[in-house]
Amino acid sequence: MIEYVDRLLQGDRRSAAKIITLIENDGADKPEVMRRIYPNTGKAYVLGITGSPGAGKSSLVDEITKQIRAENFKVGIIAVDPTSPFSGGALLGDRIRMQEHALDRGVFIRSMGTRGSLGGLASATKDVVKVLDAYGCDIVIIETVGVGQSELDIMHYADTTLVVLTPGAGDHIQTIKAGIMEIADIFVINKADLGGTEKMITDIEGMLDLSPLLKGWRPPVMATSTLDGKNISNLWETIKKHRRHMIDTGTYREAAEKRLRLEVTEIIQRKLMEIIEKDLLSNGKMSSLTEKLVNREIDPYAAAGDLLKKFLP
C-alpha cells in the first residue's frame, strides 16, 4: 500500500481511492501511509455543509461545485451518508445528484458511511481530508449526514461551515437554537422558492442580535434556490470572503492549531482505550472488576484509577 503514496502525490485518482479505502477499513499500513502523506498537506481549504435531512445539502454541494470549477479549482467532495446495515458501506453511495461531475477529472467524489460514528460524520473523515489535500484538491467539501442539535463535529473539520436550513420544515427555532448557532459561519436558507423564507431570515437575524458568541464575523443569512440557481454565485463569494477574513485576522491559523491539538488528543484516547480493552479482555480482569462494582466493593472512579495506574506513570 505504501507504493500508492507516490502515485497519489502525482495526482493519481486510483491511488487516492485505494488509500481512502485503507483508511476506512483501518488497515495495518494506515499509520505509515498517513505519516508519508502528512508533509504534503495543509494547502486545501475545507468547506463543511451540514443541516437537517431534506434541506437540499447534496443539491447545494452540486451547485457550489459548479462555481468552484468555473474558477478552475480542483474539488474533493466527501459525502457522509448513513451506513448500510448489510454491507457497512454508504447507504446513498450513488450520489445521484452529482452525476454530472462524475466524469470531471477536476472533481473527486467519495461517499463514506458513518459506521456508527456519532456527530454526523465518519470517524475517518479527518484522514480522508488529508488524502484529498495531498492529491491536489484546492477545496475539500464535506457534506454531513442529516444533523441534529448534538451532532456538531463538522466544526472540528471545516474552515468554513455552512448550516443549511429550509423554510416550512417545522419549528426552525428549535432547529437552530442549541449548538447550531455556534458552528455556523454562514446560514443558508435553501429552497427559498418556498414560502416562509423571509420570516426564517428575520428569526435567525434576531437570534444573532442576541448572541454573545459573535467575534469579528457575523454569520450572513443567505436565501438560495438550487432550482433556479438563486444566489449561488453570491454564496460562493461569501465563502471566499469568510476565508479572507479568517486569514487576515489570524483565526485561520488558530483554528488549524486547535483542530490538530484535538486530533492528537483523540488519537491518544483511542490508542489508550485499545490497550486497556485488550489487557482487560486478555486476562479476564474486567469480569472480576465488574463483580466488585456490582457488589459495591469498589466505586467506578476508584476502578478507573486503579486501571490507569497500570498504564500511566
Image (cartoon, rainbow, N blue to C red):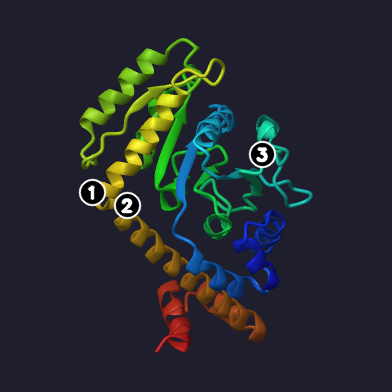
Distance of mark 3 from mark 1, alpha carbons?
A: 35 Å
Q: Position of residue 299 (x, y in %)?
A: 43, 74
Q: Do the residues under discs 3 and 1 have CB atoms within 8 angstroms? A: no
In the picture of the structure, the residue carrying the numbered disc 2 is 252
Q: Do the residues under discs 3 and 2 have CB atoms within 8 angstroms? A: no
Q: Nearer the viewer, residue 258 or 249?
A: 249
Mark 3, other Cα within 10 Å: few <14 / some 14–19 / many ≥20? few
Quadrant assignment for the N terminus: bottom right
The reply, left or right, for residue 259 in relation to residue 79 is left
Nearer mark to the viewer, of 3 and 2: 3
Asked where in the image residue 152 lies, by quadrant, the reply is top left
SS for tag 1? helix
Q: Amino acid at mark 2?
A: Tyr
Q: Position of residue 132 (x, y in %)?
A: 57, 54
Q: Position of residue 276 (x, y in %)?
A: 55, 79
The reply, left or right, for residue 98 in relation to residue 265 is right
In the picture of the structure, the residue carrying the numbered disc 3 is 104
Q: Nearer the viewer, residue 241 or 207?
A: 241
In the picture of the structure, the residue carrying the numbered disc 1 is 249
Q: Do the residues under discs 2 and 1 have CB atoms within 8 angstroms? A: yes
The reply, left or right, for residue 149 in relation to residue 13 is left
Mark 2, other Cα within 10 Å: few <14 / some 14–19 / many ≥20? some
Q: Amino acid at mark 1?
A: Thr
SS for tag 2? helix
Q: Is residue 185 visible?
A: no
Q: Residue at x 20, y 39 (%)?
A: 212
Quadrant assignment for the C terminus: bottom left
**Tag shown at residue 164:** none
